[in-house]
Amino acid sequence: MAEQGSLSFKQAGDVTLEVHLAGAWRLRGGLPSAVSVKRQLESAPGMRHIGFDARALISWDSSVLAFLVEVSRLCRLRGIDMDRTSLPSGLRRLLDLAEAVPEKSGARKEALEAPFLERVGTSAIGCGTSLGEMLAFLGDMTLTFVRLFRMKVRFRAVDLLLLIQQSGDTGGKMNRAINTTLKSALIALSLAGCSTFSARPDPSRFFTLSSLPQVEQATLKNSTRPEKIFLGVGPIKFPSYLDRQELVVRSAQNRFEVSENDRWAEPLQENFSRVLSENLALLLDTDLIIIYPWSPANRPRYHVEIEVLRLEANSERNGQLFARWSVIDGADKKVAVVKESRVIRNAKDKSTDGSVAALSEAVGDLSREIANAVSGIDGKQK
């Protein structure tokens, strides 16, 4: 069963509040309300911006739309900027639709009561037009139901919700009757079972960096060292633009493209640390590898600190890794080596698979540079 919808907050600076949406937001579940957002704003009156993080949002229905509409209303009342760019694209479109520009106060002129015959004629014309729309609507609904129960149609519940929203409440009694009929159809379909709706397949693909190839691993395992090196890996710093699940491509020197469907299977910084540690263990022929942080009682003989400057594919889909790193000798706590590495690996094909493979090779090249530096320092000490 999917994790129930949840809500959390994080202050990003003195004036920005991040609202984290996670889990499955469903009407039938107990969900958070906008009251909690209001309390956060009241406890921190200096907030001027609200942003969202929906990366952990598994699924949603109209409940999350109602929540966002209320948050938007709170922001307008308090003069707070609401950043929607991190919300799913479908949810942004529904939110924009739900917040269509209202009529300005005082813009409507007071209508004078028309003569009786004019009112009768206007009503007759309006009823004729609305009746035609009603009949066309009922015809479309009948055909849709026939296809639906014959399993010949694919329709998402979120699309039906959008259709209801578009029908609106304007246009008089006849259009309101159409809207009521459509909502009744939705209730009937819900009672019939949601299994009738055929969900679209998730186009997301998940990737991960990989360690050194098996051929190189077999060669390295045949080497022997008189004493195992105890090496610590970290701290490792990453640029904030890589702190996301989606894959990033540097399309130009100062421009990025964020993939909609290609994602990292785990946080990139954790994936990088793990693969680098595996590579160094193989290259140095040691199993005494520890990842930062470590306890004072288990301090390694050497440790490497790394600041990653770039770790993404460029416009040609080639993998590029720029990093500053240093090796610290734990005996005297002095910096033994300081270096900046710039590694670019050509992708075998211009695809995401090719880019991730090239990035893995770039991490392998960086691992070799670090391993050579640590081996050289350890050799001088002996």
Image (cartoon, grey):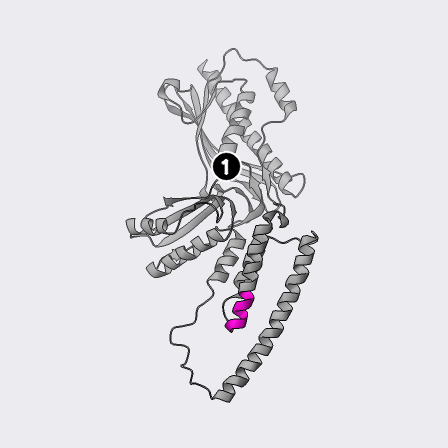
Mark 1 is on which residue type?
Pro
Q: Determine which quarter of the picture holds residue 202.
A: top right
In the current view of this chain or complex, which residue is farthest to the top? Answer: 226
> In front: 316, or 360?
360
Residue drawn at x 50%, y 84% as measured from the top left: 119
Magenta span main SS: helix
Identify the residue under disc 1: 267
The kind of secondary structure element at disc 1 is loop
- Check residue 175 for magenta coloring: yes
> In front: 346, or 277?
277
Percent across and percent down for residue 57 are 49, 45
Residue drawn at x 61%, y 15% as measured from the top left: 222
Query: In the shown orientation, is residue 47 left or right of residue 355?
Result: left
Instruction: Determine if residue 293 is in view.
Output: yes
Residue drawn at x 66%, y 62% as measured from the top left: 142
Residue stretch rendered in magenta on the structure: 172-179
Above or below: residue 278 compared with residue 53: above
- Check residue 80 for magenta coloring: no
